[in-house]
Amino acid sequence: MKSLFCFLALPILLSLSLHAQQLGGSVSRTNNTTAADLPDQPAVKWQFKTGGAVVGSPVVSGHILFIGSADSCLYAIDKSNGAPLWKYRTNGPLTATVACDSNAVFFMSGDGYFYALDKLKGRRLWTFKTNGEHATDPWDYYLSSAALHKGVIYVGSTDGHIYALDARNGKLRWKFRTGGAVHAAPTIAEDIILAGSFDGWFYALNSNGSLRWKFDTMGERYFPLGEVQFHAVVADSSVYFCSRDYNVYALHLRTGKGLWVFHEGGSWTSVPSLAGKRLLVSTSDTHRALAFNASSGRLQWNSPVGLNVFGSITTSAHYGYMGCLDGKVHKINLETGESVALFQTAASKAEAHRFYDPATKKLLPDLMERYKGDYIRMYHDFLDMGSILSTPWLEAGTLYFGSTDGNVYALQ
């Protein structure tokens, strides 16, 4: 009987460890692919309308694209034609990105529950309750996106914990308390779980939940905690992450000792990604993408965009793809930093005149006067342009992403 049990259990165990897809394409979050690139003037293959703003990122697994919406639904969409396959409604907005294996799809909802659904039918398998999920401020767009590794789900929470859950049944294996909200997606390498917190510390945990090391960000005059909002990326025994203290950090994976730091004066740094030996970083208020030699930290180029970027840059061998708050998707030459705007949402075309000078294509010089210094209202209104906060997913010459106009797009 023992041999029969092992034989029957093997496919289940394998399904929990193989074929995992998640934000950045892997638990190391490198966000690099060998997929074919898009032409500079791609066509819209399809678009799918949800009932709310789409902030999180798509994940493609097999023939299905999974993405959540502020309408509280998770959607399963046929990636070839945009046809809906199923949807599952929660009781809160979905701003996190899913992780999935061959059987199930996993995600956090704004209702304070973490869900596991049957991948093909959308049937609920289990839920896990946190102590509550919400944004910490108007620029905290995403809840934590799960990492799936060796049959364990790792996810952060607004309640300050990093949770490890059994992917088969949702049972808590352990939880680790930080001093602030954890909305970064955990990153995993060499069985080390890595995640930053809004308390300004970056944590490295062992697979049993014990602390391996932690790193205190420098902080900055206006952001003294140095909050870590987004996920890290790992390669060659180095971990890279960004902070609201305007810095990009490179640390040794096993020890947490510093390798280099770069200061982006006047702007939060957003999300790192990797293309070979090149580290790419999106930025907020300086409205540009940065490329570094990942080993030395030497800045290679910067590529300007029209507004803030809060997503990761998806990379192929030669190009990077990123969305922007102004409703445009950019294609960047990784050697030179030169970029072209591949796509602009209809909402951006219709609403850009409220924010940009049509002659110079730059933000109106009196924009803040028009808003009487109300940054929060201004950034809320920026979303009217169909902002692309979603990290694009590139596969087989097709680029998938979501927009605050409520649409999911496929370009090719």
Image (cartoon, grey):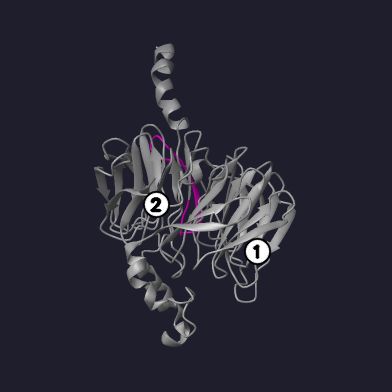
Q: Residue at x 38, y 68 (%)?
A: 383
- The image position of residue 252, as x and y in percent, is 71, 48
- The image position of residue 232, as x and y in percent, is 58, 51
Tell me the element at label 2.
strand
| Res 202 seen here | no
- The image shows residue 75, relative to residue 346, as above or below, that is above
Indicate yes or no whether the magenta region holds residue 351.
Answer: no
| Res 161 seen here | yes
Indicate yes or no whether the magenta region holds residue 159.
Answer: yes
Q: Residue at x 49, y 75 (%)?
A: 362
Q: Is 180 on the left-hand or right-hand side of 1?
A: right
What quarter of the picture does the N terminus occupy?
Answer: top left
Give the label on residue 401, or none. Answer: 2
- Pointer 2 local density, CA inside 10 Å: few below 14, some 14–19, many at least 20: many
Residue type at mark 1 is Asn
Disc 1 and disc 2: Cα gap in Å? 27 Å
- The image shows residue 169, relative to residue 355, as above or below, that is above
Give the label on residue 247, or none. Answer: 1
* Mark toward the start of the polypeptide (1 vs 2): 1
Tell me the element at label 1.
strand
Q: Residue at x 40, y 71 (%)?
A: 382
**The magenta segment:** 156-171
- The image position of residue 66, as x and y in percent, is 35, 44
Q: Nearer the viewer, residue 55 or 187?
A: 55
